[in-house]
């Protein structure tokens, strides 16, 4: 079992899900990016301990705007987000989320969130003032301001370089 599998299991347990939604095999078959935050001072030899992770990816969605008109969009989506329970409320989640926003060049209101937990919704409200949602018929949550920008994934060549760059970059410490 890989570290990604272990993180997925921990996230599923924390969210009371029947099965993990993040695994190494799913990461290989999907064009998702996982950001991992580790504490390099937590263990000897600089190996560090994993603090948490954030998984994102572009998804083609059909969403309703505030006039209930159907729109086909392909926004960056938050697919899984987990910070170890003992390390929550210490700023690690915000640090990881900010890092992702910077690397992906998006604003929080431009994201679609897949089945967010109440904890995640409170986190987004507290740190990014995201409160007013636009009701959807699918499992994704979008916020007011979502439709102020066009939602297109990076061009295939940019997406490929983004994926390889994310794999090559060290995780934020």
Image (cartoon, rainbow, N blue to C red):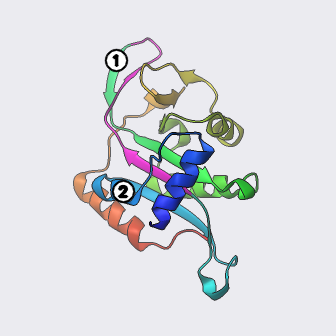
Residue 100: in magenta span: no
Vertical order, 144 against 172 (above or below): above
Q: Residue 134 — which label?
A: none
- The residue where tag 2 is placed is 27
**Residues in magenta, as a range:** 53-68
- Compare residues 160 and 20 and report the one nearer the observer: 20
Q: Residue 70 — which label?
A: 1
Image position, residue 148 (x, y; %): 46, 29
* Quarter location, residue 168: bottom left
At x 32%, y 40%, the residue is 152
Question: Does dot 1 land on a helix, a strand or a loop?
Answer: strand
In this rendering, does residue 97 appear at all?
no
Image position, residue 42 (x, y; %): 70, 76
- Compare residues 18 and 70 and report the one nearer the observer: 18
Vertical order, 72 against 90 (above or below): above
- Compare residues 4 and 149 and report the one nearer the observer: 4
Image position, residue 73 (x, y; %): 33, 32
In the figure, is residue 118 to the left or right of 18? right
Vertical order, 173 against 52 (above or below): below
Image position, residue 47 (x, y; %): 59, 80
Badge 1 crowding class, 10 Å Cα cut-off, few under 14, some 14 to 19, many 20 or more, is: few
Quarter of the image where the C terminus is located = bottom right
In the figure, is residue 58 to the left or right of 48? left
């Amino acid at each position: 079992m890989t570290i990604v599998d272990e993180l997925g299991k921990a996230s599923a347990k924390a969210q009371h899900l029947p099965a993990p939604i993040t695994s190494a095999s799913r990461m290989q078959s999907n064009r998702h990016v996982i950001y991992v935050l580790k504490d390099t001072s937590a263990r000897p030899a600089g190996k560090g301990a994993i603090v948490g992770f954030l998984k994102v990816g572009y998804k083609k969605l059909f969403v309703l705007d505030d006039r209930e008109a159907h729109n086909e969009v392909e926004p960056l989506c938050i697919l899984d987000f987990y910070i170890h329970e003992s390390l929550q409320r210490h700023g690690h989640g915000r640090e990881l989320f900010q890092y992702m926003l910077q690397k992906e060049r998006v604003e929080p209101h431009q994201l679609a969130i897949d089945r967010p937990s109440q904890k995640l919704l409170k986190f987004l409200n507290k740190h990014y003032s995201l409160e007013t949602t636009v009701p959807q018929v699918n499992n994704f949550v979008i916020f007011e301001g979502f439709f102020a920008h066009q939602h297109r994934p990076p061009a295939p060549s940019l997406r490929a370089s983004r994926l390889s760059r994310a794999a090559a970059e060290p995780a934020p410490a």
